[in-house]
Amino acid sequence: MATTEKDFRVKKGLIVGQDATIGGSVTATSFIGNGSQLTGISGGSGIQSVATRPESPSNGTIIWNTTSNVLETYVGTGWVTLASQTLTFDYLVAAGGGGGGFDVGGGGGAGGLLTGTISGIPAGTYYAITVGGAGGTSMGGTASSGTNSSIGTVAISLGGGGGANYFNNSGTSAGVSGGSGGGGAGWTYPSNGGSGTAGQGFAGGNGLGGTGTGGGGGGATAAGSAGINNQNSFAPGGAGFASSITGTNTTYSTGGKGGGDSWTGMLSGSTNTGNGGDGSGLGSSPAGAGGSGIVVIRYTGAQRATGGTITSSGGYTVHTFTSSGTFTV
């Protein structure tokens, strides 16, 4: 075996027909192949072309994926496509729904709902995601409103207004304004529903006097119904917004029902829907709480961002946030 202790430079390439052992490190400005047989080499500016992604890369590692023919980088806990320098995504933002009013109470207003598209977002951009909480109920006071949901400052939906209450001849409060307004209380001292926010939701219905019910909470696409003259029933809440952005058809931001004095079918809004809670009937029966909000982001093709629960459906990558977090392109 030939040995040398002198430095030498190869100008036109070196071909080694058999195994070679190099005691020191080798610095390579580029190389051909996937590098799977190379050890002890610090890579220069070259980008690896690989059919199988490395299992435990460092953040910022860049590869050319020969299986999907895209440029990818490793960010946090997953690979992100760099095939395009900007990202366009669709979104749905529903705030938390308001709680239902107590004792012939108005229905809770639905959380404000926004949908739209954001274009030309460069890599490295991130958005703070806030998912609004549900509004609660109160024995003897107006129900609390839901809280806001948002994608940074570009899409902010307002919490649904709380429903009004009557409570044992002590007078009534009005429904609270919000993304959608809470319904007014019924019975002896009827009150008005709260107003909604343009582009996000509608007003709550007014309560009806006499033996009437509370008004329904406003919804994303319609106002809550006014109270009806039937103490054994309820006034419907305003209609919500149906969307398949997650891949499953779901209705978001429906207003809560306004309760009649003898009605006992009140329910809380479902989690991560932005629905309003139902107003209660008898003063001894609890009203329904609102439903918490949700933020959903989707874009075409393979995953190119991080954050939320990530799924694929119909050619889209979908990021669903059921709690607050960060969306990073």
Image (cartoon, rainbow, N blue to C red):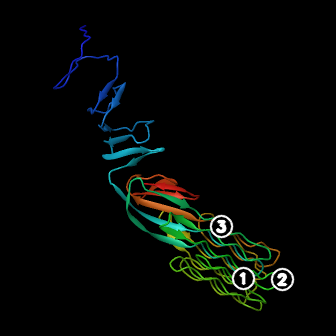
Instruction: State the image coordinates of residue 160 (x, y, percent, origin top left).
Output: 62, 74
Whether residue 52 is situated above or below residue 6 in the rendered picture: below
Which mark, residue 233? 1
Secondary structure found at label 3: loop
Kind of residue at disc 3: Ala
Of 315 and 302, which appears nearest the observer?
Answer: 302
Q: Which residue is mark 2?
A: 168
Whether residue 168 is situated above or below residue 156 in the rendered picture: below
Give the residue furthest to the top.
Answer: 1
Kind of residue at disc 1: Ser
Labels 1 & 2 near each other (Cβ < 8 A): no
**Which tag, 3 or 2, sits closer to the chain's start?**
3
Q: State left or right for residue 88 relative to residue 237.
A: left
Q: State left or right for residue 293 relative to residue 83.
A: right
Q: Residues within 10 Å of mark 2 (few under 14, many from 20)?
A: some
Secondary structure found at label 2: loop
Q: Which residue is mark 3?
A: 134
Labels 3 & 2 near each other (Cβ < 8 A): no
Instruction: State the image coordinates of residue 198 (x, y, percent, origin top left).
Output: 52, 80
Q: Residues within 10 Å of mark 3 (few under 14, many from 20)?
A: many
Instruction: State the image coordinates of residue 272 (x, y, percent, origin top left).
Output: 60, 63
**Which tag, 3 or 1, sits closer to the chain's start?**
3
Give the quadrant of residue 35: top left
Is residue 167 something that shows in the picture?
A: yes
